[in-house]
Image (cartoon, helix red, strand yellow):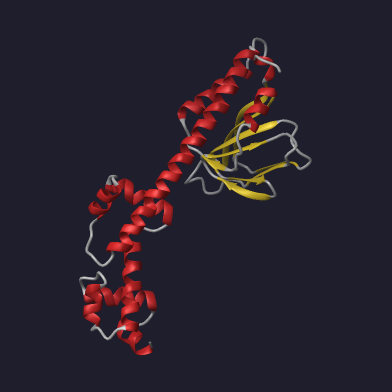
Amino acid sequence: MADGHNDVSVMGVGYSLHTRGYHTTQRDGLKSYLIRLQTEGQAQALVGNQFKTLSPGDLVVYAPGQPYELKVLPATGGSLTQSASGDYYVFCGGEWVDRWWEKQPRIFPFRITLDEGLLSTWRLLIAEKRRVWDEIDEISSNLLRSLCLGLDRLILTRSQDTKGNAAIAYKVKHFIEQNATNNFSLEEVAEYAGLSVSRVVHLFKVTFGQTIIEYAIDVRLAIASERIRLTTMPLEQIAETSGFRNYCYFSRIFRARYKVSPRQYRGAA
């Protein structure tokens, strides 16, 4: 088995910036590995048999023989971004890259942190390949190895963070469900999760797509609607025992959710 820089080959590397639209396709399969990291704007890439929208931080890696197609729409407006799509890429191959690829299963696109150390390695590799007359293959090979291993570390870190964050978010969700009828504070939620208020608020929103307060209101409304339907408790008492300290506020958001007042809801039950 080859050992040294000869088991790594960098066929092409660079940074692409597309502002006027772009389309390329190799449906019959790539001749080498392609590592591509979206850094600006958006692009549509064929991944497997589906087109996926790539946003900044999205990494895709294609093996030789896999079909490839990329579409970029022209930039419009120019106020939010100066580019329609920007990405770092490298075409590579060799026995070391084969071993790296086969080392673990990967599902793409994978969102990673746009780590400055990783991008610096990519820029150094670009600069080295531009040395037409005095490029040193061993430097390019070692930079590619560093790039691939750095990507693996970011993928592993991101996977661990995602699993840990999801566990914390579900822990918070359980806390809300158990304490929705109480007037808990965000500080209490943060203390329960062992995080800062800003961190726990962010994790919950990212995981479930709504704020802690919004979810608490959902739970309280569900409790209140069930008590309206199944008990004869006065509506003011239901509001209070469901976690609403102000009946007027309760009535307003109940109507917004169910399109009828609490009293009308009870009459229709």
- Please provide percent x and percent y for residue 258: 38, 78
Quadrant where the N terminus is found in the figure: top right
Residue drawn at x 65%, y 15% as measured from the top left? 5
Is residue 146 among the parts visible in the rendering?
Answer: yes
Q: Residue at the right extreme?
A: 28
Residue drawn at x 47%, y 46% as measured from the top left? 79
Judge by depth and name the residue closer to the eye, 175 or 215. Answer: 175
230 vs 142, left or right, is: left
Q: Residue at the bottom extreme?
A: 267
Quick check: 152 above or below 95? Answer: below
- Please provide percent x and percent y for residue 231: 30, 84
Quadrant where the C terminus is found in the figure: bottom left
Residue drawn at x 36%, y 75% as measured from the top left? 256
- Tell me the quarter of the picture where residue 164 sits: top left
Residue drawn at x 55%, y 20% as measured from the top left? 124
Quick check: 163 above or below 227? Answer: above
How many numbered marks, from 0 up? 0
95 vs 41, left or right, is: right
- Tell me the quarter of the picture where residue 16 sits: top right
Judge by depth and name the residue closer to the eye, 227 or 71. Answer: 227
Is residue 128 among the parts visible in the rendering?
Answer: no
- Please provide percent x and percent y for residue 190: 27, 49
Quick check: 178 above or below 87? Answer: below
Quick check: 223 above or below 185? Answer: below
- Please provide percent x and percent y for residue 9: 68, 21
